[in-house]
Amino acid sequence: MICCKEAGILGEKMGEKKLSTMETFKLMYHMVWCKNCRRFKKQIDWINRTLKQIDLDEKFTQEEKGDLKEKVNPEMG
């Protein structure tokens, strides 16, 4: 079973791109047992939905958006 840190990384990654079948299985299996990670995933989902409602194209260039992503979560690459 994966640790909470890895589950958090996978949960955040899920909002950006599709996870592999194995990553999805590991995350879902962990979240069955971990109440805190389920709560964290709900928070990440809410943040992702909120950010999608903001029209970032008018405010940032592609380069600026890439820089922001790297600063916010360097582990996601």
Image (spheres, rainbow, N blue to C red):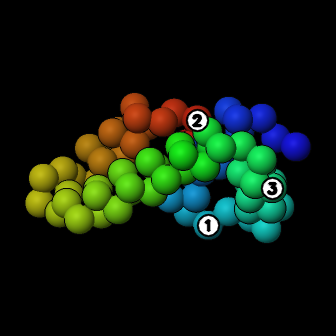
Q: Residue 29 — which label?
A: 3
Q: Residue at x 11, y 60 (%)?
A: 58
Picture coordinates of residue 67, whole percent (x, y): 35, 39
Amino acid type at image mark 3: Tyr
Sequence-first tag of 1 and 3:
1
Residue occupied by mark 2? 75
Q: Is residue 18 above or below residue 34?
A: below
Q: Secondary structure at mark 1?
A: loop
Amino acid type at image mark 1: Lys
* Distance of label 2 from label 3 (alpha carbons): 22 Å
* Distance of label 2 from label 1 (alpha carbons): 16 Å
59 sits to left or right of 40? left
Q: Residue at x 19, y 60 (%)?
A: 54
Q: Is residue 47 visible?
A: yes
Sequence-first tag of 2 and 3:
3
Picture coordinates of residue 17, whole percent (x, y): 56, 63
Q: Secondary structure at mark 3?
A: helix
Q: Residue at x 71, y 43 (%)?
A: 34
Residue at the far right in the pictured view: 1
* Distance of label 1 from label 3 (alpha carbons): 17 Å
Residue occupied by mark 1? 18
Rendering quarter of residue 22: bottom right
Q: Is residue 25 above or below residue 63?
A: below
Q: Residue at x 75, y 54 (%)?
A: 32
Q: Secondary structure at mark 2?
A: loop
Callout 2: few (<14), some (14-19), or many (20+) C-alpha neighbours within 10 Å? few
In this view, the residue in front, 15 or 27, is 27
